[in-house]
Amino acid sequence: AQKVTQAQTEISVVEKEDVTLDCVYETRDTTYYLFWYKQPPSGELVFLIRRNSFDEQNEISGRYSWNFQKSTSSFNFTITASQVVDSAVYFCALSDGANNLFFGTGTRLTVIP
Amino acid sequence: GAGVSQSPSNKVTEKGKDVELRCDPISGHTALYWYRQSLGQGLEFLIYFQGNSAPDKSGLPSDRFSAERTGGSVSTLTIQRTQQEDSAVYLCASRISRTEETQYFGPGTRLLVL
C-alpha cells in the first residue's frame, strides 16, 4: 500500500530562517513519482516539483531545494531564507504510476515577519 | 483561463439536498480527478476520468456520490441527499495525458452542509 507521512503538523519560523519540511513515503512499487504541492490561504494547490524514483539527484530552484533519498524513503523540502509569502500548507504526495496521488496530511508553515 | 476552474467557489446547503459541483479542466488535458479535503486532512481521492475509458470510481465514499464527464472536458460531481459529514473542500485536478504524471489543481469548491 502507498503511504505518505508528514510528521510535522505545524511549523513556525521567523522570516529569513531556513526551514525543512519532512516527507517519508512507503511503496512497494519500483517506479513511482514524488511531488510537493503548496496550498496558500486561497486554497488552490500549486505544483512545486515532481521526482521519479530513478532520479535521486537533489534539485534546487531559487530558495527551494529538495533532498530525495531512496535509502530512507524520504523526500524532504527546504526553504532557504523564508519569506512571509511562503506561509502555506505544504503537501507531499506519491504517485503509483497508475491513477492515483496519495497525499500526506500536510505541514502548515507560518513565517513570522 | 489557463488553469483548472471550479464552480461554485462556495456552496452552503441544507442536509438532504442535492448539490452539483463543476470542474473545467485545462484545455487538452485528457485526465481529470476529483478529490475531497476535509478540515485539517490531506486529500482523499474520489474519482478519475481518463479519455473515453470507464472512470475509476474506487474512491467514492458512498452511492450518494457520482460524477460525469461530458465530451471529455467538463465534469460534474453530484452529491445526493447531502449529509453534514460531506462538508469539505472538493478539489478537481487535470493531467495532460496518461503518461504525464503531474496533476494541476483548481481552487476548489467549499461545501458546507447545515
Image (tube, grey):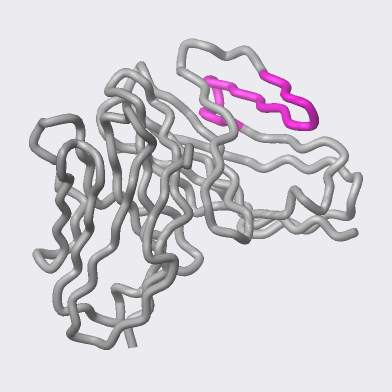
Whether residue A16 is visible to the viewer of this picture, yes or no, is: yes
User: Residue drawn at (15%, 39%), measured in percent from left and top?
Assistant: B71
**In the picture, residue A41 is in which quadrant?**
bottom right
Is B40 drawn above or below residue B5 in the view shown?
Answer: below
Residue B77 x, y percent position in the rendering:
22, 58
Q: Nearer the viewer, residue A65 or A43?
A: A43
**In the picture, residue B105 is in which quadrant?**
top left
Side (left or right) of A41 relative to A111: left
Residue segment shown in magenta? A59-75
Q: Nearer the viewer, residue B28 or B106?
A: B28
Mainly helix, strand or loop, the magenta region?
strand
Residue B19 x, y percent position in the rendering:
23, 72
Is A72 drawn above or below residue A4 in the view shown?
Answer: above
Side (left or right) of A40 relative to A30: right
Task: Assign the N terminus of chain A to one quadrant of the image.
Answer: top left
**Furthest residue to the front?**
B1
User: Residue drawn at (33%, 88%), measured in percent from left and top?
Assistant: B114
Task: Assign the C terminus of chain A to one quadrant of the image.
Answer: bottom right
Residue B104 x, y percent position in the rendering:
44, 38
